[in-house]
Each structure stands twice: as structure tokens, then as C-alpha cells.
Image: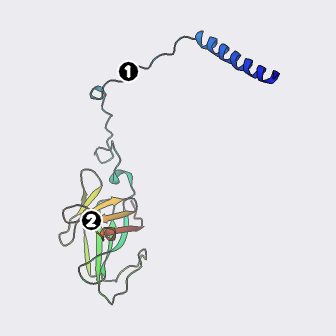
Amino acid sequence: MKIKLIIILAFILSLVVGGCASGNQPPAAQPAPRPPVSEQAEPEEEISDNGESASYHNSRNSLDWGGVYQGIIPSASGMGIAVQLILHYDETYLLTYEYLIDSAEIPEIGNFGWGKENPETYESGSFEWDEDGSIIRLDITNMPPYFHVGEGRLTQLDMSGEFITGNLSDSYILTKVAEVGQ
């Protein structure tokens, strides 16, 4: 019984002492109210090395997008199209692709000696970024030229630059298998 009484008295005493201690202190300063959103200053825009706005992160300014990408995309006939796309940081590319027929051996993705020595189709040129910095457009006309740039992968888009939907949508992804020099 004595222990319960001591605990209760200690609790009451701590409340009284705590209340007195806080009463002797000046009131805490209240933070100034935030101005409405329309009156807030805009964040300063950062300018990247190439003179473009870099105030937000996107694929172009946040990822190591240069590299060798490989994949097998669907085709209307045969087993698909083996694609290798090399993106350079000077915004040039090298594209090779080979239509795989039913008797063709499917190349292993990641094998750097991928494809034939003389690939069926070879393209090179330059590419440009969209204004959001997440999609590139190759300067080609015989294939869909748009690719969405993601972490370690490129997703081929349709001829209008839209994501491909449907059962085969995951089949339009090229995986990064090697880096290129900057």
C-alpha cells in the first residue's frame, strides 16, 4: 500500500513541478503564417551545362542513359526482331536489327557479340529529346523512332510516340547490357 501511495504522490508532484516550470518560461514564438501559394516565390531555375533548364529531374539529366541496349521485339511474321541500339552521350546512335525467322537461333541478350557480323539492317544518326527529357526520337523512318528512356532500359513506343498497350506491351523493352564512354 505504501508503494502505491508513493508512486501516486510522485506522479502528482511531477505534474505540479512540470506545470510550474512551463509557466515561468516565455511563450514560444509562433511561426509566421505562410503566404498563399500564388504569393510564394518561384524556385530559382537551375541551368545545366548545355544551357537548358535543370530545375527538375528527368531521364536526360538524371540517368546514365548512354549505353548498349538489346532486346527482341515482336514482328508480324517470324520469331521477332533482334534489336541492338547504342546511344552515345553526343546524342548519336547506332541501331542494328535482324528479323528472326523460324529456324533462326535466338541470340542471348547481353552477349556483346550479338547478332551477325553483317546485320540485316544497320542505321546510324542522331536523336533528339522531347521537352520533358524522357523520350528520344531517332532520325529514322522505317521503324517507330520513339523510345522512352528509363533506368537501365528503353521502351519502344508506337509511331505516334505513345506507349504500346496490350498483351505484348512488355515485349517492347530493350535492356541495357553495357555502358559507353562519355
**Residue drawn at (75%, 22%) of the image:** 7
Q: CA distance from mark 2 to mark 1?
A: 48 Å
Tag 1: Cα neighbours inside 10 Å, few (<14), some, or many (≥20)? few
- Render colour scheme: rainbow
Judge left or right: residue 114 versus residue 135. right
Residue 168 image offset from top left, x and y in percent: 30, 71
Identify the element where label 2 is drawn. Answer: loop
- Residue that appears at 30% across and 32% down: 42
The three-letter code of the residue at mark 2 reads Thr
- In the rendered view, tell whether residue 122 sits above or below residue 56: below
Per the image, label 1 sits on a secondary structure element best described as: loop
- Residue neighbourhood size for the residue with mark 2, other residues' Cα within 10 Å, grouped as few (<14), some (14–19), many (≥20): few
Q: Quadrant of the C terminus?
A: bottom left
Q: Position of residue 144 (x, y in %)?
A: 22, 68
Please state which of residues 117 and 5 is positioned toward the viewer in this rendering.
5
Residue 163 x/y as whole percent: 26, 62
In terms of image quadrants, where is residue 38? Answer: top left
Which residue lies under the disc numbered 2? 165
Nearest to the observer: residue 36 or residue 62: 36
Between marks 2 and 1 in the image, the one whose residue lies nearer the viewer: 2
Q: Quadrant of the N terminus?
A: top right
Disc 1 target residue: 33
What amino acid is at disc 1?
Pro
Residue 72's image quarter?
bottom left
